[in-house]
Image: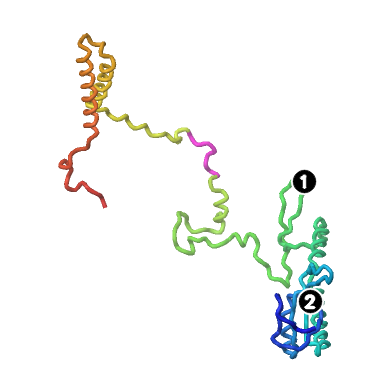
C-alpha cells in the first residue's frame, strides 16, 4: 500500500517511506505517543481515522468507538507490531489497576443498613453515647486515659478558657472572672431568662399625637367662596330679581376675582424680600 496523498485526519511522525502497511488499530489517546516512539526508532508511520469502505455500495462505516489505524514502513512492520503489542500490554495493566467503580458502589449500598460490630466505630471513643430507651437523658462516657497515653483535655477544660477582658485589659462591664463563675457561653445561653414573658401595659408603645390641621387663610376662603358664588350666578341668573345680563356679569366678575385671589395667594414673595444670605447651605 502506497502512502498516497494527504487525507483528512492523517497525523504522521515526520518520516517518509516508499511503502506503508497496516500495523493495527490503536486508541486515539495513545496514538501520538506511539508515533513519537516509532519516530525515535527511525520508523516512518502515520495514523488515519479507522473507517471501512463497502466495495459494493461505496459507503463508509465508522466504528462505534473512535479508533485510529496505524500505518508503518513495510520494511519495519514486525518491529512496529512489537511496539504496538507492548503498548497494549501496558494499557491493559493500567486498566486492571483501576478500581471498579460499579463494584465499589454496590458494596457500599449493600452495607448501608448493616450495623457495625462491637468496637468498630468511625468516631473517637470519647464521643460514644449510651442509649437509654426509658426516656432518660443520654450520658457521654469518657474513657480513662491509659498510662501509655497522656490525658487529653476534657469538656470542662475546654470550657475554662481565659476571659477576653482579662487578657486585653478592656472592661466590658464585668469584673475579673473567677474560677467558679459562669463562662461566656453559659451567659449567652441564659441571656434573657430573667425577662418577663409579657411586657407590662405601662411600657407599651404609644404613638405620638397627629400634627394639627393647617390653618386656612381668610383670603383663601374668600377666593373659594367668590368662585363658587360666581358660578352659581353665572349659570342661574334668575336667582336675583334683576336684569339677567347684569347678574351674569356679576357672576363672571366673582369668578374672575376669586380666581385672581387664589393665584395671588399662591405667588411667593418678591425677590427683594429675601435676605442676602438666603441661598444654599453647604
> Which is more toward the observer, 230 or 279?
230
- Residue at horizontal 79%, vertical 81%? 87
Which residue is tagged 2?
94
Q: Is residue 127 above or below residue 26?
A: above
The answer to whether 68 appears left or right of 237 in the picture is: right
Is residue 149 within the magenta segment? no
Residue 56: x, y in percent? 84, 69
Front disc: 1 or 2: 2
Residue 189: x, y in percent? 57, 50
Quadrant occupied by the N terminus: bottom right
Residue 109: x, y in percent? 80, 58
Circle nearer the N terminus (1, 2): 2
Is residue 198 within the magenta segment? yes
Look at the image and give the residue range highlighted in magenta: 193-200
- Residue at horizontal 44%, vertical 58%? 171
> Which is more toward the observer, 74 or 235?
74
Which residue is tagged 1?
134
- Farthest front residue? 56
Which image quarter: residue 115? Answer: bottom right
**SS at mark 2 in the image:** helix
> Which is more toward the observer, 146 or 103?
103
Amino acid at each position: 500500500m502506497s502512502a498516497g496523498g494527504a487525507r483528512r485526519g492523517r497525523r504522521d511522525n515526520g518520516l517518509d517511506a516508499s511503502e506503508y502497511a497496516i500495523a493495527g488499530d490503536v486508541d486515539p489517546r495513545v496514538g501520538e505517543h506511539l508515533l513519537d516512539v516509532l519516530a525515535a526508532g527511525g520508523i516512518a508511520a502515520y495514523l488515519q481515522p479507522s473507517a471501512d469502505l463497502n466495495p459494493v455500495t461505496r459507503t463508509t462505516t465508522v466504528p462505534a468507538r473512535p479508533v485510529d489505524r496505524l500505518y508503518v514502513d513495510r520494511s519495519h512492520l514486525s518491529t512496529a507490531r512489537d511496539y504496538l503489542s507492548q503498548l497494549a500490554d501496558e494499557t491493559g495493566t493500567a486498566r486492571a489497576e483501576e478500581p471498579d467503580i460499579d463494584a465499589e458502589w454496590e458494596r457500599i449500598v449493600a452495607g448501608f443498613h448493616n450495623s457495625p460490630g462491637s468496637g468498630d466505630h468511625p468516631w473517637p471513643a470519647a464521643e460514644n453515647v449510651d442509649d437509654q430507651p426509658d426516656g432518660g437523658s443520654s450520658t457521654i462516657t469518657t474513657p480513662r486515659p491509659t498510662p501509655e497515653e497522656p490525658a487529653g483535655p476534657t469538656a470542662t477544660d475546654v470550657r475554662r478558657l481565659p476571659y477576653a477582658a482579662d487578657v486585653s485589659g478592656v472592661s466590658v462591664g464585668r469584673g475579673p472572672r473567677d474560677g467558679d463563675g459562669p463562662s461566656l457561653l453559659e451567659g449567652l445561653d441564659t441571656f434573657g431568662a430573667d425577662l418577663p414573658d409579657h411586657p407590662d401595659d405601662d411600657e407599651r408603645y404609644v404613638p405620638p399625637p397627629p400634627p394639627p390641621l393647617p390653618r386656612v387663610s381668610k383670603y383663601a376662603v374668600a377666593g373659594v367662596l367668590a368662585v363658587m358664588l360666581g358660578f352659581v350666578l353665572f349659570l342661574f341668573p334668575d336667582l336675583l330679581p334683576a336684569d339677567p345680563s347684569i347678574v351674569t356679569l356679576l357672576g363672571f366678575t366673582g369668578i374672575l376675582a376669586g380666581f385672581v385671589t387664589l393665584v395671588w395667594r399662591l405667588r411667593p414673595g418678591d425677590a427683594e424680600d429675601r435676605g442676602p444670605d438666603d441661598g444654599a447651605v453647604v
